[in-house]
Image (tube, rainbow, N blue to C red):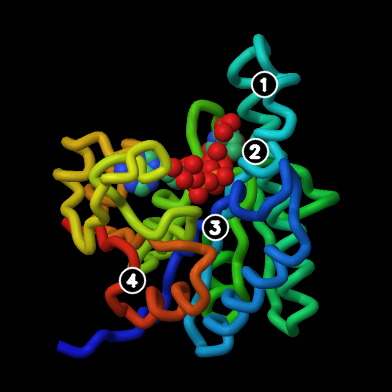
């Protein structure tokens, strides 16, 4: 059976991967390379909604956040994703791709608020929509925001572009003997507690019958192959 290109996808971009080889922050070479891949896919006419993480900035300030109230630290983490979203929008603009940022937290002088019908209209107009500030709630992650926004905009799949090239039987950064799955069901990934995404995100996608593909952000052409429905990384299915 030949692979079929997805028409509308939710792309979760790793915040932590944005720092490249740096200790924290946004590495210019890395964001330019990421943007090239994203714009190639947008130029194919695929409707692209993006959720970006905040690990590259937030983990940099995390030592100072030690002992801090959890919800306060989480709001700081969400603000970090707004910075990444603005950087991504700017980098896309330089490649001629029209992108809009919508934030789950209200900071209207900086970005427009999340309004679902408006986001849907942007997607139909061929604009990339970048969802910032996660779900807008502490105690969640941007993976859960990706599942939530993916379901809300009717994406066909959540594409998680991260630092590993798929889901393994154990964390491959800790266990070199871990084996990569090409496909795995939601029930199995949850039962085996495979932690590449949090359980809330997996459960939401499972309930909404929204498949997830996990692949490496650092592998050239992997995003295009994932968008084309090819066998890239790991597919999590119902
Ligand atoms: N079974 C597993 N298979 C693959 N990766 C795993 C597994 N268990 C844990 N991991 C870890 O999950 C990490 C990816 O998730 P993580 O939430 O850290 O990144 P991200 O979501 O891409 O970044 P950010 O939170 O900054 O957006 C990998 O780098 C890997 O070390
Ligand atoms: O809905 C959300 C999303 C994120 N956060 C906080 O932001 C940081 C960064 O997000 P990552 O998913 O780790 O990239 C996260 O650690 C949380 O502290 C949140 O509270 N709610």
Mark 3 neighbour class, 10 Å CA radius: few under 14, some 14 to 19, many 20 or more: many
Q: Which is more foreground, mark 2 or mark 4?
A: 4
Residue at 58% across, 84% down? 40
Disc nearer the start of the sequence (4/1): 1
Q: CA distance from mark 4 to mark 3?
A: 16 Å
Quadrant location of the C terminus in the rendered image: bottom left
Q: CA distance from mark 4 to mark 1?
A: 37 Å
Q: Please provide percent x and percent y for residue 148.
A: 42, 49
Residue 13 - label:
3
Disc nearer the start of the sequence (4/3): 3
Viewer-proximal residue among 12 and 18: 18
Q: Please provide percent x and percent y for residue 63.
A: 70, 21
Residue at 55% across, 28% down? 138
Residue 232 - label:
4
Instruction: Give the quarter the ligand 1 occupies.
Output: top left
Q: Is mark 2 within 8 Å of ligand 2?
A: yes
Q: Is mark 3 within 8 Å of ligand 1?
A: yes
Viewer-proximal residue among 36 and 130: 36
Residue 72 - label:
1
Q: Is residue 201 left or right of residue 62?
A: left
Mark 2 neighbour class, 10 Å CA radius: few under 14, some 14 to 19, many 20 or more: many
| Circle 3 SS class | strand
Q: Which residue is mark 2?
A: 78
Disc nearer the start of the sequence (2/4): 2
Disc nearer the start of the sequence (2/1): 1
């Amino acid at each position: 059976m030949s692979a079929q290109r997805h028409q509308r996808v939710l792309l979760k971009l790793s915040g932590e991967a944005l720092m490249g080889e740096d200790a924290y922050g946004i590495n210019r070479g890395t964001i330019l390379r990421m943007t090239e891949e994203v714009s190639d896919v947008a130029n194919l006419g695929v409707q692209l909604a993006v959720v970006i993480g905040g690990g590259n900035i937030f983990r940099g300030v995390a030592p100072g956040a030690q002992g801090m109230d959890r919800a306060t630290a989480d709001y700081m983490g969400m603000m970090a994703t707004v910075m990444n979203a603005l950087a991504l929008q700017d980098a896309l603009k330089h490649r001629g791709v029209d992108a809009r940022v919508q934030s789950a937290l209200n900071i209207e002088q900086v970005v427009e608020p999340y309004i679902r019908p408006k986001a849907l209209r942007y997607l139909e107009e061929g604009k990339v929509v970048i969802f910032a500030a996660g779900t807008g709630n502490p105690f969640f992650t941007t993976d859960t925001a990706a599942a939530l926004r993916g379901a809300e905009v009717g994406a066909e799949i959540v594409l998680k572009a991260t630092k590993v090239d798929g889901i393994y039987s154990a964390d491959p950064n800790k266990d070199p003997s871990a084996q990569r799955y090409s496909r795995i069901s939601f029930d199995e990934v949850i039962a085996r507690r495979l932690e590449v995404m949090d359980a809330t995100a997996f459960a939401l996608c499972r309930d909404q019958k929204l498949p997830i593909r996990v692949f490496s952000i650092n592998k050239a052409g992997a995003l295009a192959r994932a968008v084309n429905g090819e066998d890239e990384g790991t597919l999590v299915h119902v």
